[in-house]
Amino acid sequence: MKSDRIIEINEEKIKDHLGEFVRGTVEETLNAMLDAEADVICNAQKYEHTPERKDTRAGSYGRKLQTKAGELNLKVPKLRTLPFDTAIIDRYRRREISVEESLVEMYLAGVSVRRVEDITEALWGTKVSPGTISNLNKKVYAHIEAWRNRKITGEYSYVYLDGIWLKRSWGGEVRNISILIALGVTADGFREIIGVAEGAKEDKESWQGFLRYLKSRGLKGIRLFISDKSLGLVESIAHFYPEAKWQRCIVHFYRNVFTVVPHGKVKYVATMLKAIHAQEDKQAAMEKAHGVAKKLKEMKLSKAAELVLNSIEETLTYYDFPDEHRRRIRTNNPLERIMREIRRRTRVVGAFPDGESALMLVAARLRYIASRSWGTKRYLNMDHMKDLMIETA
């Protein structure tokens, strides 16, 4: 049959030519940008003689960069004395990290190797082989384990503890497992993830194992632990760190009280409870608590009143510490925000194939969070703690 087309066009060849054209254009542009960055650092163009010149070129080295347009060959300039720090290479390094994390997350989430290959080809123009994925997971697992078991140096005045429940498949059944996490505040006031480990559940045995793991790695100097009142946790703290005090998270305490309060009265009771923790010192807070308990009894909320009288002192330990720190050490919010991010990441997985997969994914995410700006922002001014130590000496 005769074709209606006067001119036959090989569409595949055109696509190849266009792809090669795009690749060449991107490669040429990026290399030009690298040269321009080198000119800025040297304060002079290549071969330019000027008294303002700060450095000279020393050739270049090749660097490959995977893009949707294909594999690019970059010529990274070398300078004789000054370091060549380029935003392009920095972005490439960040991209390498993000690619590795994405591959690991897909694999841990149960995505098949074949599907991972298809996804990587669609996103980055390069298909990752099954062997690469396997080797990548081994490498990342090794890095995570090294980070998880690194030696803890220095002292941490404040340590936040919490656990997250995840699901794993076990003999055809889905069972719960817990991942326990510790966040510490360094002597300089920065936050740091200092521990993450699998726990069978949030009970005394699990918490003892977790605190033993922290202590064996060198955790010391704790003045205050902040956490919910998990089963066996308070007793475990007293066993491993008898010199440390314990602060019960006031938000979790409020939630416990609300469980015995009618829905229509929760908002009013919340205002009453917040008034306790708005007092200027511990004595005033205790007096206010007794007043709140009396009011609750008058409202026929005797169980709520009993909870307040029996547990309020556990939520007032933060008054023993500097005024400037109190708002941030009376709740477990610093760790709760991270837990929300972990839940968002793990929700799509459903049930993990085993506890190690769950631990690796949570640890990988924590490691990623810690490497970002989160870990470089000063959380507390610890000079106030030094003043407190002088006062109590």
Image: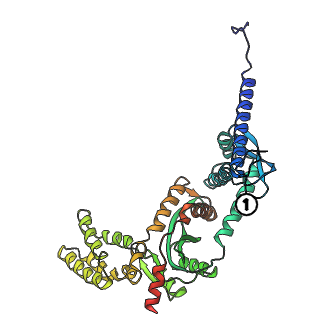
Quadrant for residue 318, please give it.
bottom left
Name the secondary structure under disc 1. helix
Give the residue displayed 51% in from the left and 69% down from the top: 378
* 276 left or right of 128 in image: left
Q: As rendered, which of 285 and 46 lies closer to the eye?
A: 46
The residue singled out by tag 1 in the image is 139
* 126 left or right of 374 in image: right
Q: How many marks?
A: 1
Q: What residue type is disc 1 on?
A: Lys
Give the residue displayed 31% in from the left and 72% down from the top: 257
| Structure colour scheme | rainbow
Q: As rendered, which of 354 and 275 lies closer to the eye?
A: 275
In this view of the protein, can residue 374 be seen by the observer?
Answer: yes
- Indicate the position of residue 221 as horizontal and vertical percent values: 55, 84
Q: As rendered, which of 331 and 304 lies closer to the eye?
A: 331
Q: Quadrant of the N terminus?
A: top right
